[in-house]
Amino acid sequence: MSTVLILNGPNLNLLGTREPAIYGATTLADVEVMCRDEAAKHGLTSDFRQSNHEGVLVDWLHEAGRAFAAGTLKGVVFNAGAYTHTSLALADAVRGTGVPMIEVHITNVHAREAVRHHSFLSPVARGIIVGLGPMGYALAIAAVAALPAKA
Ligand code: CA2
């Protein structure tokens, strides 16, 4: 069975515990269950991770690239949190590994502060889902499942 890797960046472990007016009441543990269910609907196994450390996320993308090359990973769903707006290293890791990646944001970053309007990841993403809340993760998993098989 193929896997979809769901990566979450800094502070997303706080989801559902702080700032509910912005991020809602759903916890990251709830999102993980939703992702597992959605992946199963598409015959995929989900591997759900969160880190507050940029280098750890880079390492996980490298791991994903190797798994993609080996044919055991279908793609990555990535909410890089604030690193979205700052990290050339994460964009380089996606580009360098060639792993298909769908970028997700819970909030509509384009309706927020100008600093959130730019994403280093969008140019290397296969697709982008913003502003649809936790449902965005499920939609992104469906998109990964629909990706053509690796050549
Ligand atoms: O909307 C998103 O998913 C974001 O990636 C969330 C990031 C933010 O920096 C991006 O601009 C957009 C922030 C994640 C922090 O999440 C928190 C949740 C609850 C309380 C505090 C932070």
Image (tube, rainbow, N blue to C red):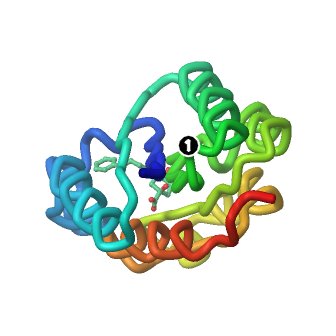
Residue 112 visible in the shown view: no
- Identify the image quadrant of residue 58: top right
- Residues 32 and 73: in front is 73
Residue depicted at 82% across the width and 61% down the height: 123
Residue 101 visible in rendering? yes
Drawn side of residue 16 relative to residue 133, left or right: left
Residue 142 position within the rendered picture, expressed as x and y whole percent measured from the top left: 46, 75
111 versus 58 height, above or below: below
When asked about the image quadrant of residue 60, the answer is top right
- Return the residue at label 1: 72
Give the x, y percent position of residue 74: 57, 55
The crowding category of the residue bearing disc 1, from other C-alpha atoms within 10 Å (few below 14, some 14 to 19, many at least 20), is some
| Image coords of residue 61 (percent x, y) | 63, 34
Work out which quarter of the rendered image holds the C terminus and state it: bottom right
Q: In this view of the protein, which residue sits in the foreground, 81 or 139?
A: 139
Judge whether 45 appears above or below 129 on screen.
above
Q: How many marks?
A: 1
Q: Nearer the viewer, residue 111 or 94?
A: 94
Query: Horizontal placement of 138 versus 147: left or right?
Result: left
User: For the residue with label 1, is its CB less than 8 Å from the closest atom of ligand 1?
Assistant: no
Q: Residue at x 18, y 56 (%)?
A: 33
Residue 109 position, x and y percent, is 55, 69
> Which amino acid lies under the numbered mark 1 shown in the image of this protein?
Thr
Q: Secondary structure at mark 1?
A: loop
Point 47% across, 46% down: residue: 5
